[in-house]
Image (tube, grey):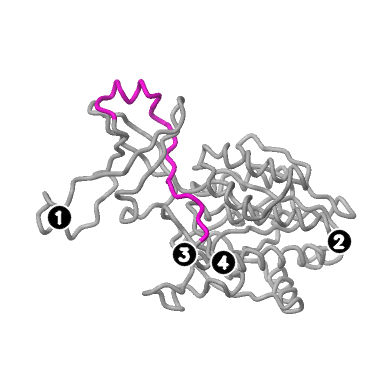
Amino acid sequence: MAYDLMTMLEEITNAPGVPGFEEPAAEVMRRYLGGFADVSRDTLGSVIGRKRGRADSPRVMIAGHLDEIGMMVTQIREDGFLKFQTLGGWWEQVMLAQRVHIFSRNGPLVGVIGSKPPHILNMEERKKVVEMKAMFIDIGAQSREEAEAWGVRPGDPVVPVSAFTVMKNEKMLMAKAWDNRFGCAAAIEIARQLGEVDHPNSVYVVGTAQEEVGLRGARTAAHLVDPDVAFALDVGIAGDTPGISSEEAQGRVGKGPVILLYDRSMIPHLRLRNLVIETAEAMEIPHQFDAVPGGGTDAGQIHLLKGGVPSLVIGVPTRYIHSHASILHLDDFEHAVRLMVEVVKRLDERTVAQIRGA
């Protein structure tokens, strides 16, 4: 299969894959990884690619998560409208009037998230954010029987509609699922580039399942990989849009990957952090720092495996995460990949033992 980076980015972001229903996204990752690594799956649905270097160990785990935020049908009303449950963290204000696909047993159906129009709300109601419980999905059905005849069932996944788009500035890429197909795409590209260089370890690049609902696939995949050191690749919050201060988010789009210093799920391993910073400085790779008091990543589960796994989060600043469309910069993606490849080349047995304090 001929490999083209932009085609891969388009395919993996356009693929549907909400928590618990990651199979289409997993299939894209599995297909691309198959050209560069030995690929397996865990029972929860995570994709694991093994790229052996000069030795079986140390084992380096590099994980992005397959799932994007989405929804699930919970009820088909008598009038044909659908009620739904969110999968992952949504802010109600970004949901209304957005198109979605309902993946029924007969194939995808287009719908739109609706609520009462403002014209019939009183002034006090207009000032309030519409709560999810007041929303519904309109698929054009006139009755429950019609919706069911089209193949809709409670439990069907609901996926945002927003096609991969190269913007006027061709380095700026918009897509529905950068959180976190960035991590999966970067893992694929890291595996490809490692095939062209020498590395003194075995690298496991992983697309985990169900991160957005509790970091679940990270636990099962890490159990199988049993890593000596680990990295989570995930998006960071871009702080370069109007209204955001540098105290709230430090990352700037186009200024390099972000080394995460803190989040709610993990305090990064100090010696591993130092190695990454020193590698970036030595190779003149632009990089940034940030700390996020809320939220967490797959590293929050991986670092707790057995007696502990030195772990770190590397991300790229991304605008409008946890919405239907987000934007990142291609240079940040490429610099994150290059940084990880250079770090992997340095993770020999002695270095990992020093990191682990052995």
Estimate how packed mark 2 is, as few (under 14), some (14 to 19) or many (20 or more) residues with alpha carbons within 10 Å.
some
User: Identity of the amino acid at label 3?
Assistant: Arg
Q: Is residue 61 left or right of residue 317?
A: right
In space, the residues marked 2 and 3 are separated at their CA atoms by 38 Å
SS of the residue at dot 3?
Answer: loop
Query: Residue at position x 71%, y 71% from top?
Result: 276
Q: Are marks 2 and 3 in contact (CB under 8 Å)?
A: no
Q: Secondary structure at mark 2?
A: helix
Q: Amino acid at mark 4?
A: Lys
Looking at the rendered image, the disc whose residue lies closer to the viewer, 2 or 4, is 4
Query: Which badge, 3 or 1, is on the more N-terminal residue?
Result: 1
**As drawn, 325 above or below 268:** above
Question: What residue sits right under mark 3 in the picture?
Answer: 319
Of the numbered discs 3 and 4, the one sitting upstream in the chain is: 4
Secondary structure at numbered mark 1: helix
Q: Earlier in the sequence, mark 1 or mark 2?
A: 1
Please state which of the two labelled residues, at mark 4 or mark 1, is closer to the viewer: 4
Q: Amino acid at mark 2?
A: Glu
Give the residues in magenta: 141-166
Task: Write down the residue under mark 4.
Answer: 171
